[in-house]
Amino acid sequence: MDTNTLTGKTLELNSLIDYQEGAVVSRTIVDKKTGTITLFAFDKEQGLSEHTAPYDAFVYIVDGEAEVTISGKSLPVS
């Protein structure tokens, strides 16, 4: 997959990544100087540690539910 552009493409996100027991799996969908789009699959009770990023964050829940904290504000999402 070309990670430089999504122009003119449609993606079935569920087909691009698989859950892995006890783990967080990631796959870069777009990787440009202006930002990245990374798809994550989280097993139950898994998460990312707090971190800073040079770009805005976008969260889209494909399956299940989670608690997302951005800039100190926690939100339940599903």
Image (cartoon, grey):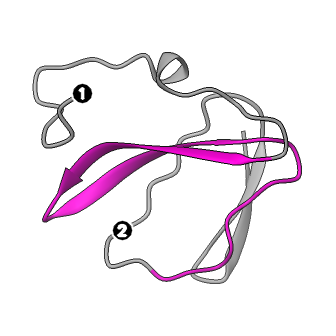
Tag 1 or tag 2, which sits nearer the N-term?
1
Instruction: Locate residue 34: give its quadrant.
Output: bottom left
Query: Tags 2 and 1 in contact by the CB under 8 Å rule?
Result: no
Can you give x and y, in whole percent of width and height, for residue 36 in the image?
Answer: 29, 56
The answer to whether residue 69 is above or below residue 61 is below
Could you tell me which residue is drawn at 17 percent across and 32 percent down? 2
Q: Name the image quarter holding the C terminus.
A: top right
Q: Nearer the viewer, mark 2 or mark 1?
A: 1
| Rendering quarter of residue 19 | top right
Q: Residues within 10 Å of mark 1 (few under 14, many from 20)?
A: few
Number of marks in the rendered image: 2
The residue under label 1 is: 1
Nearest the eye: 74 or 5: 5
Q: As shown in the figure, which amino acid type bears the numbered disc 1?
A: Met
Q: How packed is label 2: few (under 14 Cα within 10 Å), some, or many (20 or more)?
A: few
Going by the numbered disc 2, the residue's amino acid type is: Asp
The correct choice, above or below, for 23 with respect to 13 in the image is: below
Does the magenta portion include 14?
Answer: no
Q: Is residue 65 left or right of residue 61?
A: right
**Of helix, strand and loop, which one carries label 1?**
loop
> Residue at image x 73%, y 70%?
74
Residue 47 in the figure: left or right of residue 61 = right
Expressed as whole percent of the image width and height from the top left, the position of residue 54 reads: 32, 79
Residue 25: within the magenta? yes
Task: Give how far apart the Cα atoms at labels 2 and 1 are.
Answer: 23 Å
Give SS at disc 2: loop
46 or 56, which is in the foreground?
46
- The residue wearing badge 2 is 56
Residue range in magenta is 23-52
Farthest right residue in view = 45
Q: Is residue 37 left or right of residue 26?
A: left
Q: Quadrant of the N terminus?
A: top left
